[in-house]
Image (tube, helix red, strand yellow):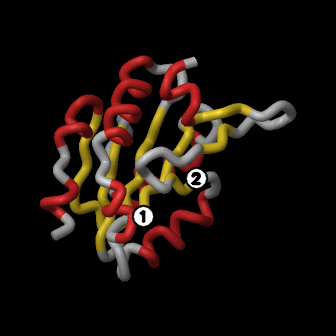
Amino acid sequence: MGVFGNMFKKSSGQKKEEVKQNNINWIPLKTVDQIKAVTKRSHNKPVGIFKHSTRCVISKTVIKNFDQGFPKELNDKIDIFYIDLLNYRDVSNEVGYEYQVLHQSPQFLLINKGEAVLHASHYDITQIDLEKILK
């Protein structure tokens, strides 16, 4: 099943995929209503949003590398939300509207004080130096 298969496990009777903790304390973003809470939270602490397609090989590789390269101590400095694009496309679309960022997959947005201050897609996500940004 591999590292990524262990990270996202589908339960019988559920269409949703639950995120298992590796280096990142992933928070599932499943409803449009949560987006307002994310925006509010970003006024106290930066928030990351990772948009991921579970059927895309590039997306699987990027999220695995992003998680493996994430310093665990950053979990105290940033909250990272995860959107499963296949099951929550409406949530993904609303994130694009709310933060004025054109949708891509995979995609990472850094939200601070209610605004997207950084966004990257595909392999550029793995080049983000969150340690430096969050100092």
Q: Are marks 1 and 2 in contact (CB under 8 Å)?
A: no
Q: Please identify the quarter of the rendering in which residue 14 is found.
A: top right
- Seen in the image, is 89 located left or right of residue 102? right
Residue 105 in sight from this viewpoint:
no
State which tag comes first along the sequence, 1 or 2: 2
> Of the numbered discs in the image, which one, if any, rests on residue 79?
1
Q: Secondary structure at mark 1?
A: strand
| Front-most of residues 63 and 107 | 63
- Seen in the image, is 77 located left or right of residue 40? left
Pick the quarter of the image with the N terminus.
top right
Q: Position of residue 107 (x, y in %)?
A: 35, 40
Residue 88 in sight from this viewpoint:
yes
Residue at the spot of label 2: 28
Residue drawn 33% across and 70% down? 77
Q: Secondary structure at mark 2?
A: strand
Q: Residues within 10 Å of mark 2 (few under 14, many from 20)?
A: some
| Front-most of residues 34 and 68 | 68
Q: Please identify the quarter of the rendering in which residue 65 is found.
A: top left
> Of the numbered discs in the image, which one, if any, rests on residue 115?
none
- Amino acid residing under circle 1: Asp
- Amino acid residing under circle 2: Pro
Residue found farthest to the bottom: 44
Pick the quarter of the image with the C terminus.
bottom left
On screen, residue 6 above or below 92: above
Q: Position of residue 124 (x, y in %)?
A: 20, 35
Give me the C-alpha separation between circle 1 and circle 2. Answer: 11 Å
Q: Position of residue 48 (x, y in %)?
A: 37, 57
On screen, residue 75 above or below 71: below
